Image (cartoon, helix red, strand yellow):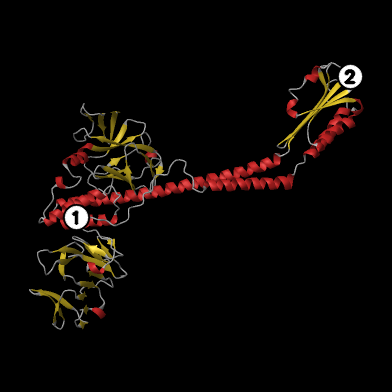
Amino acid sequence: NDYWIEDLKSINGTYVDDQKINHKTKLFLGARVQLCSSFSFLLEHNPNDPLSPGVLIQHDPDGEEVRRYIIVPKGKVFVGTNTNEVVRFSKFIESKTLGSLIRQSDGFYFINLNNEELLLKHNSELTLDFFKIGITILNIVPKTTLDETYAIGDGFENTLELEKEIKRPPEGAVPAYFWKLNIFFGILALSVTAICHFTLFNPSPNKVLTQWVNQCLTDFQNKNSKYWRQKTQVSPSSVKVILTRQPLDQEQVIRGFIENSGLSKKVDQTISFDYWEFNERRDFKEQHSNSLWIAIENYNLLGLLQLKITYWSPDLKIPVFEWERQQFLYLPSTFILLFMVSIFIFIQYRIIRDYRNTLQKEYDAFEAKRTKKIFDAKLSLDEARQLAQQGELAKALTITNGLLRSISKSMPVYKAIVELRKIVLTQIKSGGGSITVESLPGMSSNFLRSTDVSRLLYLRILGTPYAYQAPYGLKTITIGRQRRKQGVSASEGNDVIIRVPGSDEKSLQISRRHLEIQQIDTEYFMIDKSGGRTKLNGEVISENQPYSLQPRDRLTIANVIVLEVLIRANVGGLKTNNVIRINHLDQDALFIEASIGDMVTEVFDE
């Protein structure tokens, strides 16, 4: 008694429970078949009649039953308008005329327009052409002729792949290739700097040092230069020279100063120190003699070039002549390196920013899609519960079947749908009838108390003790600045009127109907109706897209007022103007509420 459906590449498409099918799919009890935009069929079993275990029930657009078509056991039924193949029997004659299917006591007979009766046996095939539905074709075939399908059987097995969950992007997320990019940028920066350094600048320490020595000689020979500290004539009998150890080419440049200064003939001693020994080995300063000392300190490390020439007398205890120069030879190359590094840092910043924005957009899109699915599933589940309570089990079963076919097992509402389907199937097998509220999943007396009484929504104006309270008992709450006038339809005006305290001009920025809040079970969902002028926790939300509301969420309305979401326990009683209520003392949180017009004042002690 298994039935399967296949769309034979029709243009208009075939739908099962409002889902277009692209694969061979199992038909189950309560399934609704829609042929393009034409009328629909409902599949039902009749286990008490072995001659007609399967029945397709046709409904008109108003849902009323029009006629029933009996499905032959182990047969195949084609629905379409192919007049070239109206009737076809395996091992029987072929006819090209329309006919009808009649049930007799010994089986089913096909009667064509010539009143020829043909007994329809098991494993035979029949094509019906009763329906004017374009070229749409419906095919029901035995299970044995099918491969793997995507059906949901009585075991409630959903073979849809689990929805790939996108987790919230971690703080400081960077692309996996980022370390390779850093290495590439580093090599590129050093290469460009080196090329510029050795081709464009190519600084020569000897050339700079020679220029300095020549300049120092000029200043040394000019007794009126600022570098001479002692203006009196100095005529030493001997001169002692202190030099820093350095490469031969630079030492020759330094010795050129002694030779050209006129002191070379008076030099009686030359001492060489390493540069870092100059500050430690100054004992020669303590020597008392008629000799004058001249120290030439030359330093070159990582492009930092320094030359210092000091001429002094130990008796005078002060320098007679002091001249000093220093220069960073690699300054242009350093600027190029810093410039390259700055460019790469900027590029890395853009890459990281775009990468994180992409992750966030993917996560937001996933959350929006998931929230929309949950929202629609909860709405449909709520409708199925109501139908089950009213005794319309077939419709309730159709809704649950469609839900199980369209959502993943990872959805939080999936389990409740499966449980409801089990209850409906059990009720159908036991003879039908309505289902009590207490037996429905998630609809116990505790649940009813939590939805009807305990969970109340407040929108507190941030920074004030005033809040807007959602009306009791409404599943859909409209919010905006336009007040609903008495006697007008529900589509005009709003259930909650919001204003900007003390500013009528800012209040006009709020849309007449700015947003809607829908309560499903114990959850609240917000839907923007302002065209993108609403923010949830600082993020602009899409219009007509449901967003789940949680306590302490913040809603920014038209950038003129911020509302904080509060979901609190109701303390009992109905809402009236200018009343005060206080909750029971044994509860954990103290809640005092005073209702004043559209707003309430509140005090929370948590």
- At x 19%, y 53%, the residue is 421
Please give left or right for residue 287 compared with residue 573 in the image: right
Q: Report x, y in % for residue 315.
A: 84, 15
Quadrant the C terminus occupies: top left
Who's the residue at 67% across and 41% down the image? 335
Q: Position of residue 97 (x, y in %)?
A: 20, 81
Of circles 1 and 2, which is in front? 2
Between discs 1 and 2, the one toward the N terminus: 2
Residue 301: quarter of image: top right
Q: Is residue 61 above or below residue 124?
A: above
- Marking on residue 461: none
Amino acid type of the residue tagged 1 in the rendering: Ala
Residue 251 at x, y = what percent? 82, 34
Q: Residue at x 58, y 45 (%)?
A: 344
Frontmost residue, 459 versus 504: 459
Residue pushed farthest left? 105
Task: Give the x, y percent position of residue 120.
Answer: 15, 76
Q: Quadrant of the N terminus?
A: bottom left
Q: Badge 1 local density, few (<14 within 10 Å), some, or many (20+)?
A: many
**Amino acid type, mark 2:** Thr
Residue 39 visible here:
no
Residue denoted by label 2: 232
Which is nearer the eye, 369 or 220?
A: 220
Q: Which quarter of the picture shows residue 285?
A: top right
Say what secondary structure mark 1 lies in: helix
Q: Is residue 20 among what the camera can see? A: yes
Q: CA distance from mark 1 to mark 2?
A: 117 Å
Residue at 21% x, 72% y: name it.
76
Q: Which residue is mark 1?
A: 396
Q: Crowding at label 2, few (<14), some or many (≥20) Cα neighbours within 10 Å?
A: few
